[in-house]
C-alpha cells in the first residue's frame, strides 16, 4: 500500500538539538512496499522517498520477527564494493553478513543511498585518487579535500524507523556515531557488533576506521 507519512514537530526535537534546521523533506515521505524474494529468502521491500532525487530514497528489507528487540542494520551505499566488488573495504561483506542475519532472525536492513559516507561519489573517487598518488588514507584524504570525513546524517533513518514502531533495537554496527544518531529514536538501542576479518586489501582501511573514526573494532584483528 502506498502511504504519505507526516510527523509532528515534537518528533524532530532531536534535529533542533543538533543545530540542523528542520525541513519538510525531513518530516514528509512517500512510502511504497512489495513482496520481495532474493537469494536470501522472502521479505518485504520498502522505499521511503523524501524527495525527487535518487539519494532522497531510503530502501528497507523487512523480515518478520517475533522478538521484542528488532535487529537493524543501517548500511550506506558503497557501489565500488557492493557492485564492482572492490577489495579495499569490508562494505560488501558487511552487507552480505547483515542480510543473512536479518533473514535468519527477522529484522530490518535500512539502505541509505549516499556513497562516500554521505560525501558523494565525486568526493569518494577524488579521495581514492589521493590515496593512489600520495598514500593518504580516507580520513586524511577527505580533510585534504576540505570535506567532513563522515558527513552522514541519520535524521531520515530515524523517521523511517518510527514507521515500523519498534519497542527496542539491536543495531548491527561498529560506528559510535551511528549508535548516537539512531538513539534519537527514543527507544532503547543495544550495540551488536558486526566485525569482518581484515584481508590484505582491507586491513589498512579498517585500521583507519578504528584509529581515526573511532569504530569499535578489536585491536587483536590488526596484530598480524
Image (cartoon, helix red, strand yellow):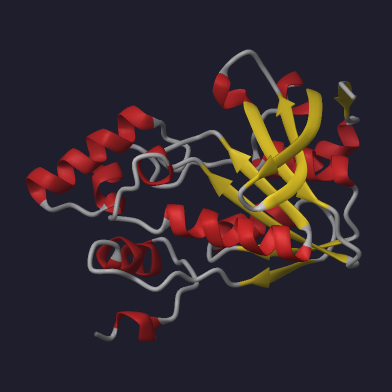
**Residue at horizontal 57%, vertical 48%?**
75
Q: Nearer the viewer, residue 45 or 148?
A: 45
Q: Nearer the viewer, residue 213 or 90?
A: 90
Query: Dividing the picture into quarters, in which one does residue 130 lie?
Result: top left
Q: Position of residue 38 (x, y in %)?
A: 64, 44
Query: Dividing the picture into quarters, in which one does residue 68 lie?
Result: bottom right
From the viewer's perspective, is residue 190 above or below residue 116? below
From the viewer's perspective, is residue 154 above or below residue 99? above
Q: Quadrant of the N terminus?
A: top right
Q: Position of residue 82 (x, y in %)?
A: 43, 44
Please tell me how many numbered marks the rendered image carries.
0
Query: Dividing the picture into quarters, in which one does residue 56 lie?
Result: top right
* Left or right side of 100 for 163: right
Q: Position of residue 43 (x, y in %)?
A: 77, 45
* Left or right side of 68 for 180: left
From the viewer's perspective, is residue 33 above or below residue 178? above
* Left or right side of 215 for 163: right
Q: Position of residue 77 (x, y in %)?
A: 49, 40
Q: Nearer the viewer, residue 224 or 106?
A: 106
Amino acid at each position: 500500500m502506498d502511504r504519505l507519512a507526516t510527523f509532528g514537530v515534537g518528533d524532530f526535537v532531536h534535529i533542533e538539538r543538533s543545530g540542523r534546521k528542520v525541513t519538510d523533506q525531513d518530516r514528509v515521505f512517500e512510502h511504497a512496499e512489495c513482496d520481495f524474494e532474493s537469494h536470501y529468502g522472502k521479505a518485504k521491500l520498502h522505499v521511503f522517498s523524501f524527495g525527487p532525487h535518487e539519494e532522497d530514497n531510503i530502501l528497507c528489507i523487512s523480515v518478520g520477527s517475533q522478538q521484542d528487540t528488532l535487529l537493524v542494520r543501517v548500511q550506506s551505499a558503497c557501489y565500488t564494493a557492493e557492485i564492482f566488488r572492490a577489495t579495499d573495504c569490508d562494505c560488501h561483506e558487511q552487507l552480505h553478513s547483515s542480510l543473512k542475519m536479518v533473514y535468519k532472525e527477522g529484522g530490518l536492513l535500512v539502505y541509505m543511498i549516499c556513497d562516500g559516507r554521505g560525501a558523494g561519489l565525486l568526493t569518494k573517487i577524488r579521495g581514492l585518487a589521493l590515496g593512489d598518488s600520495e598514500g593518504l588514507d580516507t580520513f586524511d584524504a577527505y580533510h585534504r579535500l576540505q570535506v567532513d570525513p563522515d558527513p552522514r546524517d541519520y535524521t531520515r533513518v530515524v523517521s523511517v524507523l518510527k514507521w515500523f514502531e519498534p519497542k527496542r533495537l539491536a543495531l548491527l554496527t561498529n560506528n559510535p556515531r551511528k549508535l548516537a544518531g539512531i538513539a534519537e529514536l527514543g527507544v532503547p538501542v543495544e550495540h551488536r557488533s558486526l566485525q569482518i576479518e581484515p584481508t590484505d586489501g582491507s586491513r589498512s582501511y579498517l585500521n583507519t576506521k578504528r584509529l581515526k573514526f573511532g569504530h569499535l573494532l578489536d585491536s587483536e584483528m590488526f596484530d598480524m
